[in-house]
Structures are given as C-alpha cells and as structure tokens.
Image: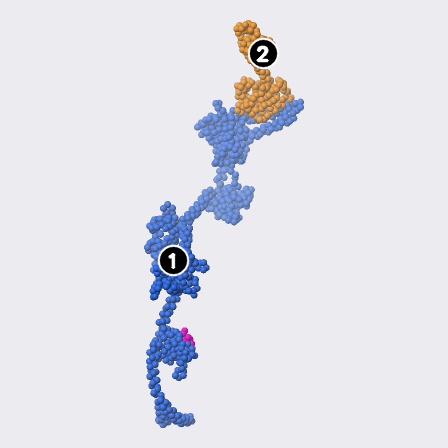
C-alpha cells in the first residue's frame, strides 16, 4: 500500500507540475527570470531520487508483509490474552497506574480513575503527581525514583490522594518498576483504598490521645485487672500518679506498697471484699510518695465479666490532692474572709432581684442585723430591723437595677436593733447581668459605719462649736470695743473694722498709717509714746493704752486701745491685733469725777480735823505718856549718877529709854499731823490690818477712857487693797468712835468693841466694826449715811456720809450689817488690788 | 517730907524707909511702867511692875512694907476697881494714884477709898517719891501693929476660958472682988487666975494688960 501511495504521489506530482506550467494560470510557473532555472533543475533531481527511493521502499515492504503474515497468527492469540488481562486490569477493585520514569500516567484502570473521579483519558498523559497532595509530591517523586533504581523490587507505602472534587482518600500503594515493551522503564502502581481503615485508625488514635490527655489533665489514671489471669493494665497516667516507671510491670501489690501506711489496711480490705463479692467499689485513700509527700486519691472501680467469664476490674484513679488542698485553702480563705468581714464589720450579700430573696448572705450580715449567724431569719424579720424611713430607698435599689439594666449603687441606711441601738450602714452594690442579658442579681456589701458616722458627727459638732465660738468672740470683741484693728510687722495699720466711721475715724484714712501717726499727742507726751514704742518693739501685748487724736471733723477724741502680737506657725512676727474704744465720754466723766473727788477729799479733811478735835483728850494723853516717861527717866538717870558710886550702866539705860520715848512722842505727833494734813489722795497698795493697827494706836486711850474693851479678829495674810492710807484710817476711826459713843450709856454689860477683817471668794476684803451699844433704829438706819444726819449733840453729821463716799471712791461699799441691840455692825468691803497688766 | 529745891537737876532725896520695902507699879503703858521702875530703883526701892491689875492680883503679895502706884485709867480692871477689890480681900496696901487728867470726882472717890496720895501728871518725881516713902512707912507701921496684935492674940489663945474671962473683966477695970462676984468665984481664985494671966500674957503691970486687951479688942464697955 505504501508503494501505491508513493506511485500515486509520483503520478500526481508530474501532473501538478504540468498543470503549473500549462494550465491557464491560477498561478504562473514560468521561468521568466534566472531563479526559475535552478528550481526546474532541482525538480528533475528530486524526481529521479524519488523514484529510486520508492523502489527501495517497495522492496522493504514486501519483506515486511511476509513477516507480518507470520506474526498475524501469534498476534491474535496475544490479543485475546491481552483482552483478558485488560478486563481484569480494568475491573480489578484495585487502582492501577502505569507511569513512566517522568511520572506521566501511561495508563490507568477504569476503577482507579473512577475512584478518583476522573475518566481514564483525563489522567493518561498527565503527571501522576496531580492526584497527590502538594506536600506529598516530593515523597511520591522520591518513591518513584526508588522504584526505578531498584527495578523489579516492590515498594509499599501509604499516602493520601486527592479526588477530582478535592476530597482526599487514603491508599496503600505497591509499586515496582519494570522494563516496558519498548525497553523503556515503566512503573506499575497498585493502590488499595484504605481510607476507611485509616479513618478508624485515626479516630482510635485520637480517642486514645484524648483519653491520655484527659487522664493527664484530670490526673485520672485508668487500670484494668483480671483477677483470674492476674493480668494488670495501667494507663500512663496511672504510672505517673503512683510514680512508677511505665516500664514496670504493674501489680496490685504496687498499689498497696504506695498506699499511706495508715490507709493500707483499709485499701487491702476494700479490694479483698470487692474480689470476694465481685462488685463495684469506690474509695479514697492516700499515698505516701518516696519524697514523703502525700497524695490523695479517689478510685472508682467497676467489676465486669470478660468474654471468658473472668472477673475483671476496670477503674479510674484520680489524684485529688490539688482538689483537697484547694478545698482546704478555700475553707481557710473562707474563714479569713469571714474573719475580715467580722473585723471590718462588713458583710457581703447577693440578692436575686426577681425572686426577691438572698442568694447569699455572709455571717457578718446577720451579725450586723443583730442575728446569730446561722440562725434562720426570714426576709420580713430582716426588713423589720431596717429603719422605716430608709426602707423605700433600699427597696428602690433592685428596681433601679432592673430599669437601668445594671448599675453601681451606693447608699446608706440604718438598722434598728431590738435593744434600741442604731447601726448606720454604708452599702455598695452592683448589678450582675445574667446569661439572658438581664439583671439577675445584685451583689454588694454592707459596712457598719456607725463609728465613722459618730466620729463625723463629733467633728461636725466640734466645727460648729468652733464656728460658734469664733462668732461669739467676734461678738464679744465688737461689743466690748468700738472697732477692731490689725497692724503689720511695720506697725502700719492693715485692717480696720467699719465701726471706726462711727467714731469719726474713716478707715480709708487710717489704713496705711503708723500707729503714732494717728495720734495727736505724740509731741505732748513723748514719754508715754516712748514706752509704748518699746512695748511694740519687744512684741509684748499691751492693754488700755490711751491716746488722743482728732476726728475727721477736727474734734479731739480719746482712744483706748489694747493689742497683742500675732505670729505665724514658724513664730514669725506678723503684727498686732487689737481693739479700740472711743473713751472721750469716759475721759470727760473722769474729769468730772476728779473734781467731785477733790471736793469730797476736802470735806473728808474737814471731818477728819473735826474728829481730831474730838480726840484731843486722847491725843494729849498719847503725847503726855512719853513725855512723862522722859521726865521720870531723866530723874532716875540723875539718881543713878548721884549715888556715891554712880551706876553708869543704869544711867545709860535711862538715857536710852529717854530717846525711845522721845521718838515715840514724835511718832504720835507725826500721825496726828498726817490726819490733819490736807494732802493729795495717794492710792497705794495697803494691808487693811496695818490700817486697823494704826487706828487702834490712835484710839486706845479713848477706849480705855470709856471703859471699852477692844477685841480684834484680823484674818492673817489678807490680799492688798488699793487705797489712801489716811482716808481709810479716817473711815475706821470714825466707825470706832461711833461705836464707843454708842456704848456710852451702857452700864449693865461690859462695853466691848470688835474689829474684824476677812476676805471672801469674790475678791473682796471685809472690815467690820461691831459695838454692843444702843443700836440703830429702823428709821435712822435709812438716814445714817445722809449728810448732816447726826444723833449727837455735837458733830457735823458728816462722818458716815464722808466715810461712805470715801469707801465708794475706793471701789467698795459701806453698809450696816447689823443694827439691832445689843449694838450695831458697820462693815465696808473693798476689792483686792489687781496688778496692772502692762 | 523733904523740902523742894529750886535748883534744876536736883538730886532726889529719899528718906530711906527703915527696913525693906517694895513698890508695886501697875501701868498699861510700857514707857511709864519702865520709867517709874527705873526711878524707884535709882533710889534703892524694890520694884514689882505689872501691866494690869489682874496680873498683880494673880501674884502673892510679900509680907513686907509696900505700896501701890497705879494709873487710874487701866484697861480691864480700872484703878478704882482694883482699890475696891483689894479692900474686899482685906489687903490694906497703901495706894498712890497717878492720872493724866484727873478729875475731882475721881480724886474724891480715890481718897475715900483710902488712897495715900493722888498725883496728876505731870508731877514732880520728888512728889511721887515722897508719897511712896510715906505710904511704905505707913504700911510698915500698920504691919508692926498687926504683928503685935497677932502676938498678943497668940498669947491670949494660950489662956484658958476662965483666964480669958478674968482678963477681960480685969481689963475692964473691975476689982478682984467684982470679978469674983461676976464670975461667981472666990476672990482668992480670981487672984490666982489674974496672976496666971499676967504671967502668960507677959504683962508687967495692969496698965500693960489693959493696953493688950485694947489691942486685942476684948475690952467690954463695962461701966467703970
């Protein structure tokens, strides 16, 4: 046939050529140019060579036809066999692939292709790697290479393949390389689908892993024990729990060995009983580990019967040491919490806002409400102890929590205890949102803040008292003075209360001035100001400093001021603070008073001189006594000297006495002169008892002459009073003389005059003169102090009137303390002399 | 007493009283008391000075011639009251009053009460001393009389009652016969009693006996 084709071609070709040249030109093959000639030449050459070749081919074809005829019989036979194999190949439940050395699929059976979701034609001619996972491809390549290197040897491996739809299946592949028909190496691969097995395997492995992990995590080991065979199986965790090497062959004895000696008997007994009764059991026991630590175990064991009818115990043993410790820890920390709550008076609680009941209530809550912890108390009982005024607020909290769906609450309320005591509670709560997104509970604390509250109240009271006290002192200061002032460290006025304007000193004009710049008597009384400046420089307080200044209107006013320095915390001098008073009116009144005093003093003098007149006899006697003594001593002295042997020492003694008596006489005269003196009033600190003694010296003779017995009760160490000696002598003399006179008519009883001095707790000295005379009638009592009142035939009637004015001028009072028979008591009271605070 | 001299500083002359004498001074004034004591001592008189009458009365008065110098106006018991008090106690001490400002009623009262003298201050000391000497002398005499009487009394006490009766009648100037009749005794018996009386009383003469009886105050005013 080949030759036919060749011949035909040769036949056609010349026609084609001829047609080219001779046929009307669809195209032209004319040799019109020099190029055409070589083409024609080449055509001739090719035709010759072609003819030769065709001849040769024809021969060879004949030979081949002969061989083919020979083969044709064997081929048919082969084809049958191949057909059989192909059937097997195609329909064997094993995937078969034939790939070449590059991995290209040469052939695949239908089963194989179908398994992978392909048509065989889709796989053939493509790399076999396409059906493997990307990650597995190097492995496949390596396997194929291995097969190729070891021709004829089988290799088996398990690997995953991808279906066309992307799903994966597990296969076990057996492969072997062999010489193909064309001498090329091919690799035959048979794949068995092991996906199902793999899945089971994986699931098993996973569940084993899970179990192991679970055992490890739960610290639970499992074990099996076939009592009949003595076969014991322990899980890894069991080994770990008992701290045996996993390679140890487990026996029940190992368990007993590890068991804590105290629990050993119990464990043994439990196991023996279980074996005997073939029953399930569960027990807790302790292990004593090699490191002396103790483990707590909980074991649950089931008795099962094996297929062979043997009893097998299968169980789980759990290390509950941590749980035990946690439990203890929890218990301890609960105790701590309870203690802390108790100590801090803080209780915690949880309130179900829907069921309106406590979910939890710490013991301290009960204690706060006055219940014994653990005592069963109803909500109503608890509620009854809440102050009725506070109850609505408390009940409002859960409502707010529900409305606001959450929130943080802080509120206070009071608990009324049955004994009447009240507790103040500060409560903090927050809402807990449940799984449904709504508020389910309120969790909070109640803290007993009674003490804090009381402390705060005390503090508030103290502050209020402080404020009130400040106001009070301000009131005092403002009412006790006309204005308040403050000066700085340079003594310039920094502050002046508004009251100054009333006194005609506008604050605006005074602020900024130095104190001595305000005054207008600085030049007139430099000494006063000099001393005042010294006080200021020494930073001493001063009191009642008086100066003169001018008002805005130009009229002089007198200001009395007192001040004290003030300092900061570091004791730095900051200035003076004080009060001032306009005392112009007082000064004027003082001046009038002085005039009055002067007149009174003159009158007193007149009265005194009159009294002296009355005392003339006594005075004469007082002077006569020493004079007579002088004369007598003089005579005696002469007598001593005139002896045959003059007694000089006696004479000397006589002269000494003469001198003494002379002095005494002059003392008497001095005293009388003092009384008669019309001098300035001299106010000096005096002891009233001294005055009394001086008066007694003056009136003794008068007392004796009138047969009057004098008694004195003078309190010792009396405080001094401030007074004029002569005037007070006059008062007492007057009272004594009156007393003597009142007793003149007394015949039936001893004439007794008493002078008493004393003090009281009010800062006064009392002096009383009591006689036992005729007393004073009720009518006269009202008038005795009136001027010109007298019951005597002689006398001015000014005595008691003057006495009263003298005593009053001394800041005291003169009164009749007792006026009925027998006798009367006249008493005067004078204030203690107070040291003037500079 | 001694006459006065016009010379100043005349030495005080004291007619020294015979035997011991003591002057009591009572004055509440220290100066006065002191100066008076000084004066009396300077003329060798013993002095006991007191501040008040009570003080003096508390002490025991000595059995020697003495006098009392006191101020009329004394605190407590006055001078005049003391005079009365002493009289009540039958103490016949002579008193010399001195006073600063004497008055007539007081002087009269004092003199009536038996005061020896009443001196008004200022007095010359010589006057005082003279008064003191006179007073002590008087006291001495009074004391001597008192002493004699006391002796006689003790002798008289040794007589029996019959003897006393005889003595009384004899001293009254009765004759033995009259005495015998009076006492209803025999005359001879009266003579014997009389002799015993004379002997016991130490009377040498009848005149002595009569004087003794007078001193004893046992003379009855029997008509002679």
A755 displayed left or right of A20: right
Q: Looking at this view, is A233 or B23 the one in front?
A: A233
Q: Residues within 10 Å of mark 2 (few under 14, many from 20)?
A: many
Check disc 2 and report its element: helix, strand or loop: helix
Q: Residues within 10 Å of mark 1 (few under 14, many from 20)?
A: few
Numbered mark located on residue A269 in the image = 1
Q: Which residue carries the number 2 mark? A: B201
Q: Residue at x 48, y 42 (%)?
A: A582
Colour that chain B carries in the picture: orange
Q: Could you give the CA–CA distance between mark 2 and mark 1, rounded to whole angstroms? A: 156 Å
Q: Residue at x 34, y 53 (%)?
A: A357
Chain letter, blue in picture: A
Q: Quadrant of the N terminus of chain A?
A: bottom left
Find residue A124 and report its horizontal and vertical position in percent.
Answer: 37, 80
Find residue B178 and report its horizontal and vertical position in percent.
Answer: 54, 5
Check disc 1 and report its element: helix, strand or loop: helix
**Residue A648 drawn above or below residue B138:** below
A410 displayed left or right of A809: left
> Is residue A138 one of those drawn in magenta?
yes
């Amino acid at each position: 046939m080949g030759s036919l084709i060749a011949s035909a071609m040769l036949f056609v070709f010349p026609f084609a050529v001829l047609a080219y040249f001779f046929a009307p030109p669809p195209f032209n093959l004319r040799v019109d140019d020099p190029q055409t000639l070589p083409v024609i030449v080449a055509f001739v050459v090719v035709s010759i060579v072609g003819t030769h070749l065709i001849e040769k081919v024809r021969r060879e074809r004949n030979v081949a036809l002969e061989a083919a005829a020979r083969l044709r019989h064997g081929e048919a036979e082969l084809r049958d066999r191949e057909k059989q194999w192909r059937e097997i190949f195609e329909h064997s439940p094993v995937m078969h692939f034939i790939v070449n050395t590059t991995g290209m699929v040469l052939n695949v059976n239908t089963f194989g292709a179908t398994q992978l979701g392909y048509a065989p034609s889709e796989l053939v001619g493509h790399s076999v790697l396409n059906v493997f996972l990307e990650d597995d491809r190097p492995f496949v390549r390596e396997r194929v290479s291995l097969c190729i290197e070891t021709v004829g040897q089988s290799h088996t491996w398990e690997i995953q393949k991808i279906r066309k739809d992307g799903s994966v299946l597990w296969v076990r592949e057996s492969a072997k390389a062999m010489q193909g028909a064309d001498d090329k190496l091919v690799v035959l691969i048979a794949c068995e689908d092991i996906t199902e097995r793999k899945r089971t395997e994986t699931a098993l492995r996973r569940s084993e892993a899970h179990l192991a992990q679970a055992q490890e995590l739960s610290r639970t080991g499992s074990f099996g024990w076939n009592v009949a065979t003595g076969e014991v199986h322990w899980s890894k965790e069991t080994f770990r729990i008992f701290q045996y090497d996993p390679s140890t062959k487990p026996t029940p004895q190992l368990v007993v060995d590890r068991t804590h000696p105290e629990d050993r008997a119990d464990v043994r007994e439990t196991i023996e009983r279980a074996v005997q009764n073939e029953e399930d059991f569960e027990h807790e026991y302790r292990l004593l580990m090699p490191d002396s630590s103790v483990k707590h175990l909980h074991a649950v064991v089931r008795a099962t019967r094996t297929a062979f009818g043997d009893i097998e115990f299968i169980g789980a043993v759990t290390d509950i040491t941590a749980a035990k410790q946690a439990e203890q820890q929890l218990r301890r920390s609960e105790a701590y919490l309870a203690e802390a709550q108790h100590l801090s008076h803080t209780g915690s609680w949880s309130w179900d806002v829907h069921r309106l009941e406590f979910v939890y209530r710490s013991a301290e809550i009960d204690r706060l409400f006055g219940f014994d912890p653990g005592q069963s108390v109803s909500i109503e009982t608890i509620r009854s102890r809440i102050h009725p005024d506070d109850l609505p607020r408390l009940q409002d909290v859960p409502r707010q929590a529900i409305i606001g769906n959450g929130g943080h609450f802080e509120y206070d309320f009071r608990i009324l205890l049955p004994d009447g005591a009240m507790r103040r509670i500060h409560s903090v709560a927050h809402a807990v949102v449940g799984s449904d997104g709504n508020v389910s509970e309120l969790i909070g604390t109640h803290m007993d803040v009674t003490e804090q509250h009381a402390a705060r109240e005390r503090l508030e009271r103290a502050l209020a008292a402080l404020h009130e006290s400040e106001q009070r002192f301000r009131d005092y200061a403002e009412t006790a003075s006309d204005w308040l002032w403050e000066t700085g460290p340079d003594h310039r006025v920094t502050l002046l209360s508004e009251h100054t304007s009333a006194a005609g000193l506008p604050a605006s004009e005074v602020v900024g001035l130095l104190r001595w710049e305000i005054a207008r008597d600085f030049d007139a009384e430099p000494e006063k100001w000099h001393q005042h400046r010294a006080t200021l420089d020494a930073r001493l307080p001063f009191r009642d400093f008086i100066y003169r200044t001018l008002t805005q209107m130009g009229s002089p006013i007198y200001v009395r001021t007192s001040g004290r320095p003030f300092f900061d915390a570091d004791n730095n001098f900051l200035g003076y603070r004080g009060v001032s008073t306009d005392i112009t009116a007082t000064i004027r009144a003082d001046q009038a008073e002085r005039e009055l005093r002067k007149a009174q003093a003159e009158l007193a003098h007149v009265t005194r001189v009159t009294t002296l007149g009355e005392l003339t006899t006594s005075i004469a006697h007082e002077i006569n006594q020493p004079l007579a003594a002088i004369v007598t001593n003089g005579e005696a002295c002469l007598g001593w000297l005139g002896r045959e042997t003059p007694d000089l020492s006696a004479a000397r003694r006589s002269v000494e006495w003469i001198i003494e008596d002379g002095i005494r006489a002059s003392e008497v005269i001095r005293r009388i002169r003092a009384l008669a003196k019309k001098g300035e009033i001299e106010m000096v600190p005096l002891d009233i008892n001294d005055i009394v003694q001086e008066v007694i010296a003056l009136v003794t003779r008068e007392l004796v002459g009138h047969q009057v017995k004098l008694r004195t009760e003078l309190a010792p160490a009396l405080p001094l009073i401030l007074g004029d000696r002569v005037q007070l002598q006059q008062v007492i003399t007057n009272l004594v003389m009156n007393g003597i006179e009142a007793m003149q008519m007394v015949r039936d009883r001893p004439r007794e005059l008493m002078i008493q001095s004393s003090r009281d707790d009010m800062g006064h000295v009392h002096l009383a003169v009591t006689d036992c005379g005729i007393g004073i009638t009720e009518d006269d009592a009202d008038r005795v102090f009136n001027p010109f009142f007298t019951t005597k035939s002689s006398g001015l009637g000014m005595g008691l009137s003057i006495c009263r004015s003298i005593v009053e001028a001394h800041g005291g009072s003169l009164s009749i303390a007792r006026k009925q028979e027998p006798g009367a008591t006249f008493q005067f009271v004078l204030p203690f002399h107070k040291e003037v605070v500079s | 007493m001694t006459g006065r001299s016009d010379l100043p500083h005349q030495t005080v002359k004291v007619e020294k009283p015979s035997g011991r004498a003591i002057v009591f001074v009572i004055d509440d004034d220290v100066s006065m008391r002191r100066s008076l004591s000084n004066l009396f001592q300077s003329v060798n008189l013993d002095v006991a000075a007191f501040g008040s009458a009570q003080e003096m009365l508390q002490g025991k008065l000595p059995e020697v011639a003495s006098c009392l110098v006191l101020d009329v106006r004394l605190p407590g018991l006055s001078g005049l009251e003391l005079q009365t008090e002493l009289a009540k106690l039958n103490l016949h001490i002579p008193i010399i009053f001195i006073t600063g400002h004497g008055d007539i009623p007081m002087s009269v009262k004092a003199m009536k009460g038996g005061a020896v003298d009443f001196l008004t201050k200022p007095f010359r000391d010589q006057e005082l001393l003279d008064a003191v000497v006179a007073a002590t002398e008087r006291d001495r005499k009074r004391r001597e009389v008192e002493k004699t009487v006391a002796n006689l009394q003790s002798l008289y006490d040794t007589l029996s009652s019959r003897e006393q009766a005889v003595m009384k009648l004899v001293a009254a100037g009765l004759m033995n016969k009259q005495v015998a009749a009076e006492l209803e005794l025999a005359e001879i018996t009266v003579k014997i009693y009389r002799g015993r009386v004379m002997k016991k009383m130490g009377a040498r003469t009848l005149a002595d006996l009569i004087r003794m009886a007078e001193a004893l105050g046992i003379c009855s005013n029997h008509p002679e």
